[in-house]
Image: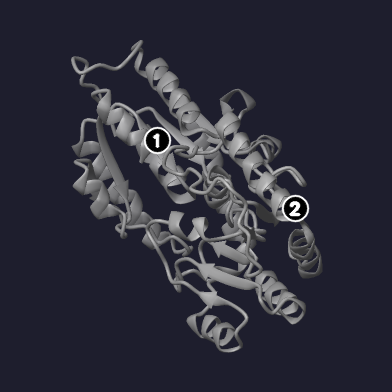
Amino acid sequence: MGLIRRLKELGYEVLVIAPKDSFSTKLISEGFSYINLYVDNYGTSIFKDFKTLRQLHKIYRKNKIDLIFHYTIKPNIYGSLVAAWCKIPSIAVTTGLGRLFVYKNPLVKFVATNFYRLAAYLSKEVWFLNKSDQAVFIEKKIVAPEKAFLLNSEGVNIQWFKPKRNQPRNTHKIKFLFAGRIIWDKGLAAFAEAAKAIKESHPEAIFQLLGFVDESNPNAVSIDQIERWQKEKIINYLGETSDVRPFLEEADCLVFPSFYKEGISRILLEASSMAIPIITTNHVGCKEIVEDGFNGLLCEPQHSADLIRKIQQFLSMPHSARHQLGLNGRKKVINEFDEELVIKQYLEVIGKLLRIKQPSKEDQRSIK
């Protein structure tokens, strides 16, 4: 949102093409053009994907587009193919590997990888949010090294996500918050096991779960499972929200034991920007944000015992030490992940590809 707001301020016309969700109305309310796109996010049906491809072709032909940024696997693949067919320059932003290389069906994996290779060839550039993903794509010869660029996360608005308290929380009821999509790949099994173990020795500890339950996702945690955790008084489910800040403000520590192929975890950026200490995994997309012992603690992915040890370590810290972890996280975000740094990179590339030094009100080129 920060990026497209800036583009609008600079005189660009912005068209957002995405599946309809709760955020779509916010885009419209702020005056952005929006088109609903059908995407079968988790399916492997070529017939359903062809529907997406045809729709993109119709949109790209109808609208006078000068430059396209694609995000996530299917738009990166099909959007890049259609953009090349319509002779529109495009950039593919790889926001994490997701399930690209873990498909059980070898044919699906082969087809997806080779389609991505073609899409990368047809794109002007391919951007990555972490060095690990960039290295994988280059090693597998999906993208040429000269086309692969690092975007240091999608950035975070450090003024919107800023600390509200200046002093350490002084309470014996320590709140551990998980916030994110409620899928097993985010480490929910380890989170639940850790909560159960910790509450046996620290019954006053509180474990909270915040996020959207996407039951269309094959790895979704079911509502029934969440209800069981609640009945067992292991975890308190807070539902979903469009503004995570009030929940982070009340948390003593964000616990995010993900082993998903993240690009750069946004919730970790938001928590760090608000000076919230973090316990997360030594895993791609997480370890780039948290330095063990500096702004949080790292545990091994899919390792409940190690997560429990790190939570116990956090509980044993004095209030001042926990507070310092949060302050260090805020400093790290300001220096490395400020949204302004990311927007600057976008504007430089837009200027290069459209051959303009700086967008203005007079130059009404459209970026869609």
To which residue does mark 1 refer? 69
Residue 321, image x, y percentages: 73, 49
Q: Residues within 10 Å of mark 2 (few under 14, many from 20)?
A: many
Q: Position of residue 5 (x, y in %)?
A: 30, 34
Q: Secondary structure at mark 2?
A: strand
Q: Secondary structure at mark 1?
A: strand
Under mark 1, the amino acid is: Phe
> In the picture shown, does residue 366 fall above or below 259?
above
Q: Which residue is at the far top?
A: 357
Does residue 155 appear anywhere in the picture? Answer: yes
Position of 47 relative to 238 (above/below):
above
Q: Visible in this render: residue 150?
A: no
Q: In this rendered view, identify the residue nearer to me: 118 or 67.
A: 67
User: Residue 174 occupies which quadrant of the picture?
Assistant: bottom right
Residue shown at the point (59%, 83%) measured from the top left: 229
Residue denoted by label 2: 298
Q: Is residue 116 left or right of residue 319?
A: left
- Mark whose residue sits in front, 2 or 1: 2
